[in-house]
């Protein structure tokens, strides 16, 4: 169904422009990875706390509020540097199972982060049991690392 | 090749020719496993380093006293660093000649060494009076260490990602 769309990205003048440059694509990949580190840091600083470790003297709610802007910046940076890679590689991505795993898990991880994880981490202290917090943090790590980051790296390795 | 590098060059080629290195290089799955693991471990290490550097710059995680953030994230940063280093060493062991001749690999190693010096300089020069700024925006020295840390680790990641592109090799 989406094949014509991916084909048109693949044949677009943007894809041509990127592929004719020696630097744009590699630098885009590299900066994508820098935003990944920022994004992962903003996710992990809270998830580790939800697991009952890390900055234990600080409240979950404050860590959540402090890390939120960096989560947004990291995510926007990932999208901004991810789209050119998609355009440039559109047909390869289309036929990559790992790309589709990433694209299916990504919305799940996003919705989870902005609903369940956000409500649990902003709840008043003591309202959510440590057990529930641990599960919420663990699911977040599994979704973002296991469901999004690892398949992303595998796109390039197995196509 | 200059003479004083000869022992290193010989070592690199000896590793390259060893059975385990060859097996690793030719195994698609084991090699890929370490590539993936290296990125995941980098996320833990660099991610939490970035969180600390943003706090040093006075622009992130400001509700947590710096000393607390430093103390509590340190074990995780060290875990991330140890795992990144271990997986990175395996990758180098599996393809030593390629890394040895790669400019971005050596840029990465150099930047990491400078980043380590920056961290040590911060610890011995700017961290001693943390009690005066633990709940506030840090003074200039600490801010400088944070800015340098962000820039250096950012370029470490960039140089690392550019290793597959050996534009400067003939």
Image (tube, coloured by chain):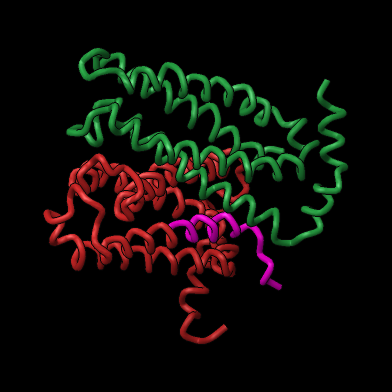
Chain colours: A green, B red
- Image position, residue B119 (x, y; %): 29, 62
B101 sits to left or right of B119: right
Is residue B27 magenta-colored? no
Q: Residue at x 63, y 56 (%)?
A: A27
Residue placed farthest to the bottom in the image? B3
Q: Is residue B127 above or below residue B30?
A: below
The residue drawn where x is 24% and y is 57% is B138
Residue B93 seen in render? no
Apparent side of residue A8 relative to residue A143 in the rendered image (left or right): right
Residue nearest the viewer, comparing A51 with A127:
A127
Residue shown at 42% from the left, 28% from the top: A141
Expressed as whole percent of the image width and height from the top left, the position of residue A40 reads 44, 39
Please report the bounds of the magenta region as a residue range: B153-170
Q: Quadrant of residue B146?
A: bottom left
**Placement of A123 over or under B107, stated as above or below:** above
Asked whether B93 or A77 is in front, the reply is A77
């Amino acid at each position: 169904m989406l094949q014509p769309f991916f084909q048109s990205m693949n044949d677009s003048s943007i894809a041509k422009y990127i592929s004719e440059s020696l630097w744009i694509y590699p630098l885009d990949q590299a900066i994508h990875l820098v935003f990944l580190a920022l994004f992962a840091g903003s996710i992990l600083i809270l998830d580790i706390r939800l697991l009952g470790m890390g900055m234990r003297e600080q409240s979950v709610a404050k860590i959540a509020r402090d890390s939120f802007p960096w989560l947004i910046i990291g995510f926007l940076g990932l999208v901004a540097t991810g789209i050119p890679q998609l355009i440039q590689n559109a047909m390869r991505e289309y036929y990559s199972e790992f790309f589709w795993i990433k694209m299916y898990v990504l919305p799940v991880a996003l919705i989870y982060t902005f609903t369940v994880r956000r409500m649990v981490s902003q709840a008043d202290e003591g309202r959510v049991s440590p057990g529930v917090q641990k599960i919420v943090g663990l699911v977040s790590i599994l979704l973002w690392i296991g469901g999004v980051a690892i398949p992303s790296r595998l796109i390039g390795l197995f196509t | 090749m200059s003479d004083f590098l000869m022992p290193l060059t010989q070592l690199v080629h000896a590793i390259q020719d060893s059975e385990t290195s060859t097996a690793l290089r030719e195994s698609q799955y084991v090699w890929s496993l370490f590539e993936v693991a290296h990125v995941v471990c980098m996320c833990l290490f660099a991610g939490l380093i970035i969180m600390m550097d943003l706090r040093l710059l006075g622009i992130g995680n400001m509700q947590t006293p710096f000393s607390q953030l430093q103390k509590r994230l340190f074990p995780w940063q060290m875990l991330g660093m140890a795992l990144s280093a271990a997986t990175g060493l395996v990758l180098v062991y599996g393809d030593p000649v390629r890394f040895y001749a790669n400019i971005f690999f050596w840029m990465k190693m150099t930047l990491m060494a400078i980043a380590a010096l920056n961290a040590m300089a911060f610890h011995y020069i700017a961290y001693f009076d943390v009690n005066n700024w633990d709940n506030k925006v840090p003074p200039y020295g600490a801010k400088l260490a944070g800015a340098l840390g962000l820039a250096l680790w950012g370029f470490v990641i960039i140089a690392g990602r550019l290793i597959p592109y050996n534009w400067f090799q003939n």
